[in-house]
Image (spheres, helix red, strand yellow):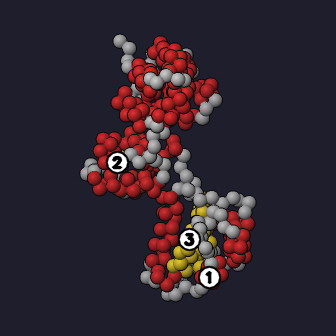
């Protein structure tokens, strides 16, 4: 480790754009303290014809008026051997006054480049793996605090539904909401008012809305589903109804904790199932599954397949007297 406390090279790997931007920004901010950024910062896009000799020369250049020089190599997921091998050789004995940031969406641990960076120090690999879909609302809530606001769970879920899974897009839309919303917390109504849907509706969002017995949201999302997905949506909804029936039965016996094991799913996949199941009677859930038979026949050839599917969904959502 150099006198600056920095390693001579880091691998920033993963598809989470916000995490990656944060890691790069911190390093740039440290360099900016010298006041000599323009003489000590070199950024290269490695997806374009990379001049490896020029890059190695830049890595071996001494800093000017600064403790270290920063060389950022972006797009290193699939480097040609003629490019990666000189980097591996350089990393075997890197310049102590240069920090090389190697950025990649993915890089296998068995590649020579990954091994060369990992050999420097266990802290040299910065994990920026993408956030799983089900974890994104919580991540959005964390990101909101960095903008000086909080955001409700319902609002965070709606933002993910409308903006998609790209964390940079989510962060941009959060910044927009912060500008538009005066209150300290962003609510569902704020997202619905200010954020235009750019992401395709995911069937999981629709299934969850039906499971929650939210008529307005269910019909809104149904109207946004592509017609080609009706059969797939029908299949998924039948599966969800069966899951809710199992949840209802286990809950009645006081065995709700066994739901994930019974369905052979992860606990996060059924975290709301018991709550949803309690919004239906067992008779309603069984009737919904029985009604699926007629819908299947309509989907297999009727010109009224959309009407049949929509009517079935409406009947599921409508509460029995």
Earlier residue among tags 2 and 1: 1
The residue identified by callout 1 is: 54
Residue at image location 49% in from the left, 87% down from the top: 65
**In 3D space, how far apart are the residues under numbered discs 3 and 2 (Cα atoms)?**
32 Å
The answer to whether residue 15 of the structure is visible from this angle is yes
Query: Where is mark 2, residue-wise?
Result: 195
Residue 50 percent coordinates (x, y) = 61, 75
Q: Is 225 positioned to the left or the right of 80 in the image?
A: left
Count the labels in the image.
3
Tag shown at residue 277: none
Position of residue 151 in the picture relative to residue 17 (left or right): left
Quarter in which the N terminus is drawn: bottom right
Q: Position of residue 38 (x, y in %)?
A: 46, 82
Marks 2/1: CA–CA distance: 44 Å
Residue nearest the observer in this picture, 181 or 76: 76
Q: Residue 200 appears at what percent x and percent y?
A: 45, 43
Q: Secondary structure at mark 2?
A: loop
Mark 1–mark 3 Cα distance, whole angstroms, equals 13 Å
Q: Are marks 3 and 2 in contact (CB under 8 Å)?
A: no
Q: Residues within 10 Å of mark 3 (few under 14, many from 20)?
A: few
Image-quadrant location for residue 156:
top left
Which secondary structure, mark 3? strand
Label 1 neighbour load within 10 Å: few <14, some 14-19, many 20+? few
The circle drawn on residue 45 is 3
- Mark found first going from the N terminus, 1 or 3: 3
Q: Residue at horizontal 47%, vertical 80%?
A: 37
Residue 286 vertical position relative to residue 227 in the rendered view, above or below: above
């Amino acid at each position: 480790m150099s006198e600056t406390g920095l390693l001579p090279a880091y691998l920033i790997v993963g598809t989470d754009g916000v995490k990656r931007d944060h890691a790069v920004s911190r390093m740039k901010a440290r360099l900016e303290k010298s006041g000599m950024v323009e003489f000590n910062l070199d950024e290269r896009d490695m997806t374009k014809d990379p001049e490896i000799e020029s890059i190695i020369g830049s890595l071996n250049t001494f800093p000017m008026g600064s403790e270290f020089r920063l060389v950022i190599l972006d797009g290193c997921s699939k480097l040609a051997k003629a490019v990666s091998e000189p980097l591996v050789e350089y990393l075997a004995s890197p310049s102590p006054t240069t920090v090389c940031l190697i950025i990649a969406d993915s890089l296998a641990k068995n590649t020579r480049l990954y091994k060369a960076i990992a050999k420097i120090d266990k802290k040299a690999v910065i994990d920026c793996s993408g956030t799983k879909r089900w974890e994104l609302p919580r991540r959005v809530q964390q990101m909101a605090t960095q903008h000086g606001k909080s955001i409700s769970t319902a609002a965070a879920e709606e933002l993910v539904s409308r903006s998609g899974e790209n964390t940079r897009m989510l962060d941009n839309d959060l910044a927009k909401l912060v500008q538009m919303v005066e209150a300290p917390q962003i609510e569902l109504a704020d997202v619905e008012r200010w954020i235009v849907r750019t992401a395709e509706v995911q069937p999981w969002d629709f299934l969850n809305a039906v499971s929650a017995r939210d008529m307005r949201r269910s019909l809104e999302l149904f109207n946004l589903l592509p017609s080609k997905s009706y059969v797939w949506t029908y299949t998924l909804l039948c599966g969800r109804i069966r899951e809710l029936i199992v949840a209802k039965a286990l809950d009645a016996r006081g065995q709700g904790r066994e739901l994930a094991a019974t369905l052979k799913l992860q606990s996060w996949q059924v975290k709301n199932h018991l709550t949803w199941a309690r919004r239906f009677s067992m008779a309603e859930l069984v009737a919904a599954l029985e009604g699926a038979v007629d819908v299947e026949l309509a989907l297999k050839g009727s010109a009224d397949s959309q009407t049949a599917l929509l009517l079935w969904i409406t009947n599921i959502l409508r509460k029995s007297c």
